[in-house]
Image (cartoon, helix red, strand yellow):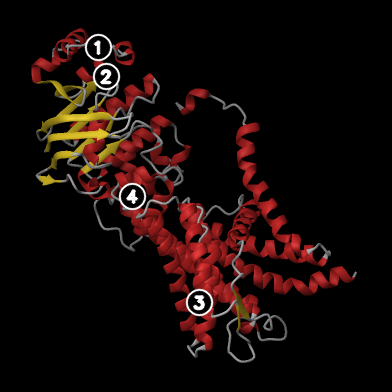
Amino acid sequence: MSIITSIFNALPGAVAQGLIWGIMAIGLYITYKVLNISDLTVDGSMCTGAAVCVMLTIAGMPLPLAMVCAVIAGMLTGFVTGIFHTFMGIPAILAGILTQLSLYSVNLKIMGKANQALSVRNYDLLVSLQYIRNVPIWKNAIFVVSLFVIILIAILYWFFGTEYGCSLRATGSNLNMSRAQGINTSFNTVVGLMLSNGIVALSGALLAQYQGFADVQMGRGAIVIGLAAIIIGNAVFGKIFKNFAFKLLAVGLGGVIYYIVYQIVICLGIDPDLLKLLSAMVVAIFLAIPYWKKTYFAKPKKGGTKNA
Amino acid sequence: MLEIKNIFKTFNPGTINQKVALNDLNLTLNDGDFVTVIGGNGAGKSTMLNAISGVWRPDSGNIIIGGVDVTHMPEHKRARFLGRVFQDPMLGTAANMSIQENMALALRRGNRRGLKWGISEKEKVQFRAALQTLELGLENRMTSKVGLLSGGQRQAVTLLMATLKKPKLLLLDEHTAALDPKTAAKVLELSEKIVRENHLTALMVTHNMKDAIRYGNRLIMMHEGHVIFDVSGEEKKNLTVEELVEKFSTASGQEFANDRALLSK
């Protein structure tokens, strides 16, 4: 009984935190699904967003402005990876790893130490784990983050429907075709990486406020959690959500489901040290499923001449 | 319309894989020329098309399209002069975008892509009409993902995309080689029709000598990176495959030892 009560009690927090990670996953979706690049920068840029937001707020900058700066800082990290990849010809994964590694130093320098607190008692924060119960609805963390998710999805839906957004999607879909149609694929790749990491930094800024601190370790393994959210979202909602906006929503909800399961697992008493191992295994298996399907369970096509 | 002047290109220079791909290539196309290009494997046919479209820069020489020297222009910039259809049907279209989105992308070739909506209602009407001319029923599937289409359908759509915005030069790089004979014939007919109706200047690489003779007003044969035989008008119309093989032997001093070309007599 007590387990169920504790799960129930942890649920709202899990939803709020899951939504914040959902924003991160939406950012990752832009590189992973739209641009067709596995961008490891996110492991560093999430913390960069948090660090910039926390330090600027402590320094007395108004919070919204600090968050805008966090997003810009995140975009800069994406810019660096983009330059590594396009201008310097480094494979995308390696480019991301290089940026991520250098961001560890950068993040430490931004914060001055490994951990910086941002207490909700001293600052007027947008979201906090204190704002889960007994607060007016408009202050509730779940409500505020949901608002962020919805506005973000609306902006992205509009953006990827524009002429330029279409050319970004084409870049991820087919580089040859894109160049043949006059699209500057290098430029677009850089822009896509900037957009993605800007969103990841936004989620970092929100997470730092929510948990009340920024920590140099906070983005570690973010790409795995983000991929998990994308995969879960697609597995649960893939059949019903076909529209681009709904696909993004599915990613956001994927983050929520991930964190609910995470909470349940913790409440069941599994060693939290093992959680990253479990997450990675789950993601690995889900990434393998499409490959296994193709290799071992492929049905012979009916009407072979159709695809001639 | 197109001037290729003294183009040289060597791949992997200084290694054991060194390959002289284009060796003093010269070619001038007049407005409205529909030129078929034949030659053995490694003769430089596709390399020539890649040089024109800017996939890489030549070692020396100049390429001029419609009076503009594009030799040092990056691939995406000179795309505004060119319509391109590739050998691989998968290369010419974005598989996970819809037919109409692909066409909208192609219609904006050479334009600045801003934050206006990516496709307008007026354009959809235009695309429907264009797709109708293909007679493949695609006008009723405009929101289908291109990845769901067959290779032939994809080449037909790519062909439309290459010519939606009239290019100064249409480059067809063995664009029917990956298709079955029936589909290939259909796509060829379609190419001919589009070139004729839009008065396009076109370069078509083919392995099929019959097609090379049958289509276009001019035929060039390439060997070892340059043009060894150039024929047009009546003389080209009256060519036979045997004569072509003969011409190849005399012009190159070699047997036309290419199974694919011989088989496709």
Amino acid on which disc 3 is placed: Lys
Mark 3 vs mark 1: in front:
3
Secondary element under disc 3, as helix, strand or loop, is helix
Alpha-carbon neighbours of circle 3 within 10 Å: few (<14), some, or many (≥20)? few
Amino acid on which disc 4 is placed: Leu
Residue of label 2: B40
Is disc 2 in contact with disc 3, using a CB cutoff of under 8 Å? no
Secondary element under disc 1, as helix, strand or loop, is loop
Q: Is residue A90 found left or right of B198 in the rendered image?
A: right
Residue of label 3: A109
Amino acid on which disc 1 is placed: Phe
Alpha-carbon neighbours of circle 1 within 10 Å: few (<14), some, or many (≥20)? some
Residue of label 1: B256
Amino acid on which disc 2 is placed: Gly
Residue of label 4: B105
Q: Nearer the viewer, residue A28 or B89?
A: A28
Secondary element under disc 4, as helix, strand or loop, is helix
Residue at x-position 52% and y-position 55%: A243
